[in-house]
Amino acid sequence: MTTTTELPGRAGRHLTADDLAELYAAHRLSLVRLAILLVDDQASAEDVVQDAFATMASRLHKLRDPHAALGYLRTSVVNGSRSALRRRRTARAYVPPAEAEPPGPDDRVVLAEEHREVLAGLERLAPRQREVLVLRYWSGLSEAEIAEACGISRGSVKSTASRALDALEQILKGEGR
């Protein structure tokens, strides 16, 4: 088996798959050792070297010099090792967000009381104001759909909704009693 320094008569032509196979056989172990020293993990080192050879295989048509090919592989292994370390550091630094506590019984009681207050406040509004707010916020209708349902203009829907929200706010603050 020949090494890359002994590829006779190959100067000036593109590397072939056979040349890559020879490079692999001659230098894979030394490149894995290099990567192990950089990433401190054999499995990651083997992945880095495999990626370097796979990338070179896709670029064989651009390489002419076997010496340059070996340099390309070494550079690729060093850069791949850096990337592996960066990914590892990012993964170790990741802290998943804390899950929110489910609402407890006290929260449910407070929410239920607030809902009761809003419903009671709605009952104190004028019928058209109540209709507009219910159609808009409960049914999710657009202004045009509310206008059609109530038989009023879109402008009236906007002004009625604005006045109704102001009135409801006053009621909920206790000033409208």
Image (cartoon, rainbow, N blue to C red):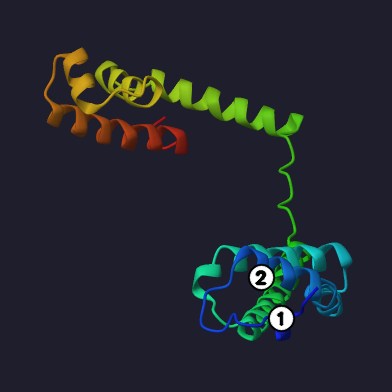
Crowding around mark 2 (Cα neighbors within 10 Å: few <14, some 14 to 19, many 20+) is some
Above or below — where is 46 with respect to 137? below
User: What's under tag 1, amino acid-wise?
Assistant: Thr
Q: Quarter of the image containing the C terminus?
A: top left
Kindly indicate the quadrant of the structure image that contains residue 22: bottom right
Q: Which residue is mark 1?
A: 4
Above or below — where is 108 with respect to 82? above
Q: Which residue is mark 2?
A: 19
Tag 2 near tag 1, CB within 8 Å:
yes
Position of residue 164 in the picture relative to residue 43 (left or right):
left
Residue 66: give x, y in percent of width and height. 64, 81
Mark 2 vs mark 1, CA separation in Å: 8 Å
Position of residue 30 in the picture relative to residue 106 (left or right):
right
Mark with earlier residue (2, 1): 1
Residue 109: give x, y in percent of width and height. 68, 27
Kindly indicate the quadrant of the structure image that contains residue 34: bottom right
User: What's under tag 2, amino acid-wise?
Assistant: Asp
Residue 93: give x, y in percent of width and height. 75, 66
Q: Residue 139 shows which numbered tag? A: none
Secondary structure of the residue carrying numbered label 2 = helix
Q: Quarter of the image containing the N terminus?
A: bottom right
Residue extending furthest front? 9
Residue 9: give x, y in percent of width and height. 60, 82
Above or below — where is 158 with respect to 134? below
Above or below — where is 131 with respect to 102? above
